Amino acid sequence: MTQHLTVVDHPLVQHKLTLMREQDTSTRSFRQLLREISLLLAYEVTRDLPVTTRTIETPMCEMDAPVIEGKKLALVSILRAGNGLLDGVLELIPAARIGFVGLYRDEETLQPVEYYNKLPKRMEERTAIVVDPMLATGNSSVAAIDLVKKSGAKNIIFLCLLAAPEGVARMKEAHPDVPIVTASLDEKLNEKGYIVPGLGDAGDRMFGTK
């Protein structure tokens, strides 16, 4: 994956995203749509995984068949909203190792503060896919990827549902080596830091906490 930002414009992705954006979509439907769209995004984010071959026996003959090379993938969820994307990606890559990064925003400094960090071992040998539905200001995403890099990971991809130009720019400045895959690059952030047109707070809509 060479370019910094990839917007997945597949018709199914865009259709499901439209349904998620609608304010009348129920919590149950929102959760199901997020699971479905994350599976489709996972297909795109894994497009360039390295492959090798191994010898297998089909019912007809022996052959050298392609398999993914290296250690199992690491999926890293930025809590709590990242878990919604994580579920769908896991359906496609059930053998992946799972990590979690918990961050909250300090109300005085507005900077992310770490409260939880549990990542798989041997991250330097794995491709890491960091998931969070919203790339808004980019501060939390940058902080999470800082932690993933500290664990030794070198090959990292960031997967989100929506991105704002401000967040993309912040990520490119801090982590130009980390490509971003998203379903939409939206217009802007509002004065409260929400993506516009966006879909509101993804965590609240997913967990029904609003």
Image (spheres, rainbow, N blue to C red):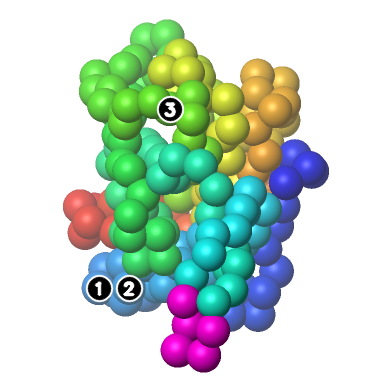
Along the viewing direction, whichever of 107 and 37 lies nearer the viewer:
37
Q: Residue at x 31, y 17 (%)?
A: 114
Give amino acid for label 1.
Arg
Asked whether the residues under the numbered discs 2 and 1 touch, taking CB atoms below 8 Å apart as contact, a structural biologist would say yes
**Secondary structure under the numbered disc 3 in the rendered image:** helix
Along the viewing direction, whichever of 196 and 3 lies nearer the viewer:
3
In the rendered image, residue 157, in percent from the top left (x then y), is placed at: 58, 40
Residue underneath mark 2: 32
Q: Residue furthest right?
A: 3
Residue 77 vs residue 155: left or right?
A: left
Mark positioned earlier in the residue sequence (3 or 2):
2
| Distance between the alpha carbons at the discs numbered 2 and 1 | 6 Å
Residue 202 vs residue 195: left or right?
A: left
Q: Residue furthest bottom?
A: 60
Residue underneath mark 3: 123
Residue underneath mark 1: 28
Q: Residue at x 65, y 32 (%)?
A: 178
Q: Residues within 10 Å of mark 1 (few under 14, many from 20)?
A: few
User: What secondary structure do most residues of the magenta stretch adopt?
Assistant: loop
**Secondary structure under the numbered disc 1 in the rendered image:** helix
Give amino acid for label 3.
Met
In the rendered image, residue 148, in percent from the top left (x then y), is placed at: 45, 24
In the rendered image, residue 138, in percent from the top left (x then y), is placed at: 56, 30
Q: Residue at x 31, y 42 (%)?
A: 98
Q: Residues within 10 Å of mark 2 (few under 14, many from 20)?
A: some
| Distance between the alpha carbons at the discs numbered 3 and 1 | 34 Å
Residue 52 vs residue 125: left or right?
A: right
Determine if residue 206 is in view: yes
In the rendered image, residue 56, in percent from the top left (x then y), is placed at: 48, 70
